[in-house]
Amino acid sequence: MIAARTFGFTGLALCLSTSLGAQSAIRRELVWGGDAEGGAPFVEADPANPSRVRGFDVEVAERIARGLGRRAARFVQVQWSSIDQSVERGDFTLGLSGVEDTPVRRARHAVTIPYFEFREVLAVRTEDAGRIHGLADLRGRRVATLGATIAYDLLVAARDSMGLIPLSYDDDVHPYADLTAGRVDAVLLDHIIAQRALRRGGGTGFVILAQPVALGHYVGVFARADSMVRDSVDAVLREAMRDGSLEQIFRRWDVWDQSQGALFERAVRANAAPTGTAPASHALAYLPSLAGAAGVTALVSVLSMLLAVIVGLALASARVYGPGWLRVAMTLYVEVIRGTPLLLQLFVIYYGLAGVVRLPAFLAAVLALGLNYAAYEAEIYRGALEAVPRPQLEAARTLGLSELQILRLVRGPQALRFALAAMTNDFVALLKDSSLVSVITVVELTKQTAIYATNVGSWVVPGALCAAVYLAMSLPLARLARRLERRWRPAT
Amino acid sequence: MSALLAIDRLTVRYDSREVLRALSLEVARGEIVAVMGPSGVGKSTALRAVAALQPFDEGRIVVDGFALAPGPVPPESRLVPLRRRVGLVFQAHALFSHLCALDNVTLALRHVLNQSRSEAEEVAAKLLASLDVGTRAAAWPSQLSGGEAQRVAIARALAPNPPLLLMDEPTAALDPARRSALGTTLRRLSEQGRGLLIATHDTEFARGHADRVVSLTT
């Protein structure tokens, strides 16, 4: 017993000293977070050594680490849209990856002085370059951008004032792919991203309009509690602007231009970064978008379910009545669809089939969800059809009804009653699964909530609102199903 | 006069077990014939074979000129003439649970005989009234008593006006008063020129109401 206790104390002391040692090691390096999926020239996996990252933001982080006297800058991968939340959680000290300077971000977190000035530029198809010169020429047209960015806010504002249709993407590659494919009419994004996309496409397919729509700045973001570190980093950035090391970094990555020089001059001259606060009306401004997104969720779900029911009925009928080969084919469909992720099916239908048929995002979303749920519906209907008692079918046969009439007038209606509860469950599940369609640019409730949360810098209110809207849609469904079941079930 | 129904040496086997061996009987128009025997003797099997719900192995069945041969049950498309000739009342009635009594009766009128809804409902209402369940037209099958359900099932089978009516154990769920009333109903149907073949193990009912009794033994 005593020996065990002694051993316990020794172990505790050992752990303590190890963890203290680890902490001092961490203190010696600057842990920074960014999204390598964003790619060059910001942050990308080094092709020569994919376990390392490279890019101008990587070098800026290293310059900051040096300036702070840290041993090294250690990179932590984080999804771009989650940088603010992760830095507040303490996943890393500094967020740096094309992070935009916005009033909301300044109000919520400790933000550095701007270290790079970018232009929000419009890209349009080459043949449209003569017609489209700015947002005002895009009335009724679809304009893509990355979600939760200044560009997206610009588009949302332009939707109301100019009547264009903003489309939000999760990445900055597909907007340009969809532009050349004709799915969208323009893309509004940072000039660095636009130029990179143009290079990737061999300089053809679209042009970048010379006149920028707006100017923006990249900043580093710290947790609100880390404003002291932020102040030190501001000093390091000013020093790097003065000594030319920042310019060298930008020149190495071929993103240096005259506007950076002007920005540096302003930053060095001014001692404090411009600050702003989030207007209280900002949160309220998102409510109409949330309501609209809830409408999209409802519409996608209803249309998908309709498709799922129709295809599911056909599949189930084929499995119950069809010849052997058809039954095998339908079983294969059901198993393949149920055995692969819905997300994969969404990508295949939207991006994979783009070479054959270029489906609009909304249609692709309804098709993917509908065809996926059809497999589940088919199994429910098959079970329900087989649950109709045999004497009911024999009675119908003796009356002279054809097989099709029996299915339509006797077996189908009775099976529907058996299937109703399971169908309602599926519809509620579909309602929630419809959030997946945001990966193919359909902005529905969850996506809009994520955008809202990123902008206000918190998930508490947006999350609660979003949950309330989902519940408001799913609870009446369950009630309706119970009522229908009661109505259709003959009273006993 | 040729028989409405002629069963000649009807034999049915399940696997290798013979459940019905060489049954022969005839039913004339206006005649009530009862097939009697204990449970499992093949009474229901014989009725199901006549209604082409069940294949048979040997023998021959002719219903008003339409012949059924041994072997698998033919597809429904070839059974249309038989369906017009034979009505079947199941032992457990097998009323369509999702339709009210009236709709159970109008189903064949509307969708097989292509009558209009109003036409079909008029015929059905009359049939139900003649069977003393006219007031139960709007009731669901689960709301009907055993006797009522049986009379609705008879009305449903009679709706397409088949000359031959088959009934499987019609007295199984009836009290004595109802049994007697059923006997009267069946007599009235036979007097309209129908042939009735009834499978029953109710000796008293068979003797009291059938014109002829055919006994099956194991």
Image (cartoon, coloured by chain):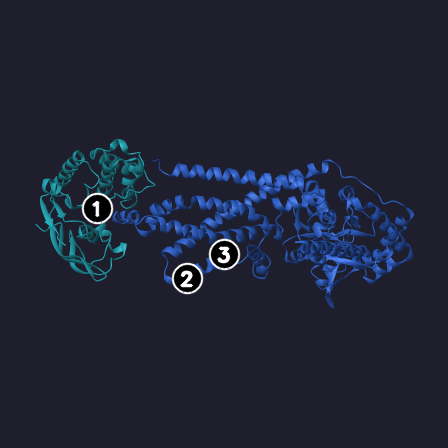
Chain colours: A blue, B cyan
Q: CA distance from mark 1 to mark 2?
A: 37 Å
Residue that appears at 22% across and 38% down: B151
The residue under label 1 is B87
- Eye-nearest disc, 1 or 2: 2
> Which x, y percent locates residue B101?
29, 37
Pick whichever, A163 or A330, lies toward us: A330
Pick whichever, B72 or B29, lies toward us: B72
Q: CA distance from mark 3 to mark 1?
A: 45 Å
Name the quadrant of the C terminus of chain B: bottom left
The residue under label 2 is A328
Q: Secondary structure at mark 3?
A: helix
Q: Secondary structure at mark 2?
A: helix
Q: Residue furthest left?
A: B1
Please state which amino acid type lies under the numbered disc 2.
Val
Q: Is residue B136 left or right of residue A322?
A: left
Pick whichever, A280 or B29, lies toward us: A280
- Eye-nearest disc, 3 or 1: 3
Q: CA distance from mark 3 to mark 2?
A: 15 Å
Pointer 1 local density, CA inside 10 Å: few below 14, some 14–19, many at least 20: many
Q: Residue furthest front?
A: A2
> Which x, y percent locates residue A227?
82, 45
Chain identity of mark 1 = B
Residue A47 seen by the camera: no
User: Which numbered circle lies on residue A338?
Assistant: 3
Q: Compared to A80, does B137 lie above or below?
A: above
Marks 1,2: beta carbons within 8 A: no
Please state which amino acid type lies under the numbered disc 1.
Gly
Chain identity of mark 3 = A
> Which x, y percent locates residue B72?
24, 60
Chain identity of mark 2 = A
Q: Secondary structure at mark 1?
A: strand
